[in-house]
Amino acid sequence: MDSPPPPGPPSPPLPPQPSFSQKPPLTPPQIVQTITAVLTSDKSSLSSLTPFVPLLTPPIIHAVISSKTLASRPSTLLSFFKWAQNSIPNIGNNPTHALPPLLTLLSSLFAHNKFADAKSLLVKFIAADRHHDLHRSLLHPAQSLPRPSKALLDTAIGAYVQLGRPHLAIQIFKKMKRLRLPPNLLTCNTLLNSLVKYPSSHPVLLCREIFNDVIKLGVGPNTNMFNVLVNGYCLENKFKEALELLNQMNEYDCLPDNVTYNTILDALCKKGRLNEVRDLLMDMKKRGLLPNRNTYNILVYGYCRMRWLKEAAKVIDLMTQNNLLPDVWTYNMLINGLCNEGRIDEAFRLRDEMENLKLLPDVVTYNTLINGCLEWKSSSNAFKLFDEMTEKGVEPNAVTHNIMIKWQCIQGKMDEASDAVSKMEESGISPDCVTYNTLINGYCKKGHLGEALKVMTEMGGKGLKMDNVTLNTILHTLCEEMKLDEAYELLASVSKRGYIVDEVSYGTLIVGYFKDENVDKAMTLWDEMKEKNIIPSLVTYNCLIDGLCKSGKMEQAITMLNELLENGLFPDETTYNTIIHGYCWEGNVEKAFQFHNKMVESSFKPDVFTCNILLHGLCKDGMLEKALKLFNTWISKGKAIDVVSYNTLITTLCKERRLGDALGLVAEMEVKKLAPDHYTYNAIIAALTEAGRIEEAEDLMARMVVTGKSSDQSTDSTSMDNRQDMVEVGTLGKPDSSSIAYSEQINELCTEGKYRDAMHLFIELTEKGVSVSKSTYISLMKGLIKRKKPILKGI
């Protein structure tokens, strides 16, 4: 409690404690006087107020807190209010009744500069205020309540932001703007920072509007405020606006710092726009800012992402020369780059180097190595790492479990994936959106749409909101089913439901329309995406270039390559290989080699896929000798080749009746431990048979059976998978006339937007063992996506 006031006239004697048999009972003024006397007494405690609980109504509590006697004791008033909240149900459970005393108490706290206590009180109250009584009172105060002060409005903005409700904080800010009350600089920055991360449509436009209002209200911005806005632009890939804002900082007597530059550098690196990264680094140095460890780490990440590992290593050398030692984060990026290249042994050596430098591998290190091992078919090492991390005191996190679940899904082992989720929960880690999206994607790819729908329902039941990944998974499923119009309709409708449609969403549909040979619609979508200021990523460009190449539109594909370069993106191996394949596809091998040679001069590093594309193109055009020359040159340079490389040449040699050369290559494969597959054997068997060497053909067929390379076996396996998918699409049995009728009824409800009714009917049918059609599952999945409520309804 507060220190006692200076001595004054003696306090009146305490009225008698309430006796409920006593008549007449105490009047409200007497109760207020008694409570006030207890609170001002040094000898009394709050527990002595317990007998008064039945008499304490909200008006009496308000009167006590409004007492002039207690006006100089804000801490006492705060203790009393908290006691009342805990002791009196009418106050603790009913924000409406608690509001008048709360507002009066807040006035006292602000008057005595107890801002931290006031904010803590507001946060607790707002959390329980389901009907937004306080928010309504701040915007439209009742005549019986005090007008909200600048301090109250300012602190309330911070409280609503802290609770993740910036959409309500904005409305309070707008009231301050109308009243010409400037918020504190910290409040402005807190609000802006919350908004740029809040899932809504175009949050940075709203932030810029607030920034302009803040300036008009006379609040001087600082570098931190600009950094928040720069981050907002970068999150929306609006790099031009971010750079313009950086250059405008001088107008407001603010200077960009390392955070400003690192924010933009990080965003540019993530998009592979390394030309702009170099320019920005030059600008940074001109301003006298030295790169810090974060700057170097961002560059390492950018180069590793582009698979330019030599350049990443050079950055680390430069970092060391500037007396900045690499940290765990730096090593993790390099390990990730090596894993992406399939250089797992080198990644493990780098992990050992970390430990020698007393840098302990963390959960990210282990997650990266586990994922790399699984990606490159070394599952035994992945499971060893999983056990090792626990032994070394590194606890697996949600990402670790999600990696294992993803691997099971990729393998098509959905039962094992489901078991992995159960183990995840048993270890005390709750499945997150990534977990559920991985399962949904896995079930959709297997054709188990009923299971996918079940997971979507479970996801919503656990309070997890479906996000862009869920949306993109359903869009992909619709495109795979060639339901392209339905996919487009879903894409067009979901932005009103709080989803941020991104380049992946559009890219999925663009690929779908190319597969449907509808080039015009694919290009229309591309234009629509750019009109909506959705910036294509390198992957999106690669999808478009691939579609154009396969459609025989090589000139347009080259135009897109040039556009990609103009936008500051760096093509990768996929980009170049796609165009080389496009030229070979249309029979223009000479142009393919010209393009290949030109790109090699521009730092393109051909890989085994490049070799295979060129080999196939040469063989297809009857240039076998050139193909053999390329093959031998490739080997002499120590470049990697695979089974496909050999099969391409062996098949062509067999067609040319050069069986001896073909068998020589088979022997070479075995020496290099590249096991021949059923394509190799089939080509050789056909050539032996045609040459009349029947016994050798039969011997080779016997070897195929022993080694499990039988082409018939492969065909049987594929057929079995197809049959299984057909059965498991309708997991409840073969549809009869009644199930077809029910399916149509559910589809009709979905068309009318009655998704809840459709879901109830589906659950009822499931319980009865009635099956539904594949299209019904898809309709219900679309419905679950569409049911997501708009997030920023209040703005």
Image (cartoon, rainbow, N blue to C red):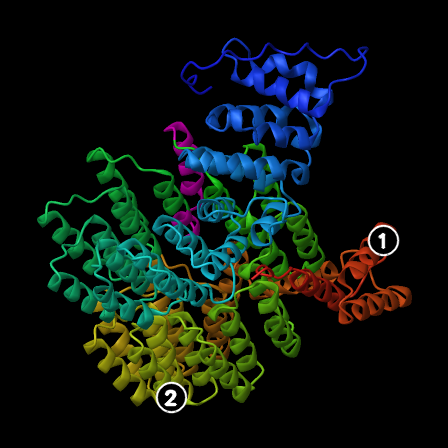
Please determine whether, in this image, residue 584 is positioned above or below residue 284. Answer: below
Question: Quick check: 83 left or right of 286?
Answer: right
The furthest residue to the left: 321
Q: Secondary structure at mark 2?
A: loop
Kindly tell me whether residue 58 is visible in this rendering. Answer: yes
Query: How far apart are the two marked residues, 1 and 2, measured between alpha carbons?
Result: 61 Å
Residue occupying image coordinates x 81% and y 13%: 23
- Give the left or right position of residue 167, taking residue 718 as reference: left
Q: Mark 1 vs mark 2: which is more N-terminal?
A: 2
Q: Nearer the viewer, residue 506 or 132?
A: 132
Which secondary structure lies at badge 1?
helix
Q: Residue furthest right?
A: 738
Residue under pointer 1: 764
Q: Main secondary structure of the magenta part?
A: helix
Magenta stretch: includes residue 392? yes
User: Compared with residue 478, is residue 35 higher up or lower down, i.e. above or below?
Assistant: above
The residue that label 2 is drawn on is: 621
Q: Which residue range is magenta in the image?
A: 371-393
Is 521 magenta? The answer is: no
Task: Name the foreground residue: 211 vs 669.
Answer: 211
Q: Is residue 672 visible?
A: no
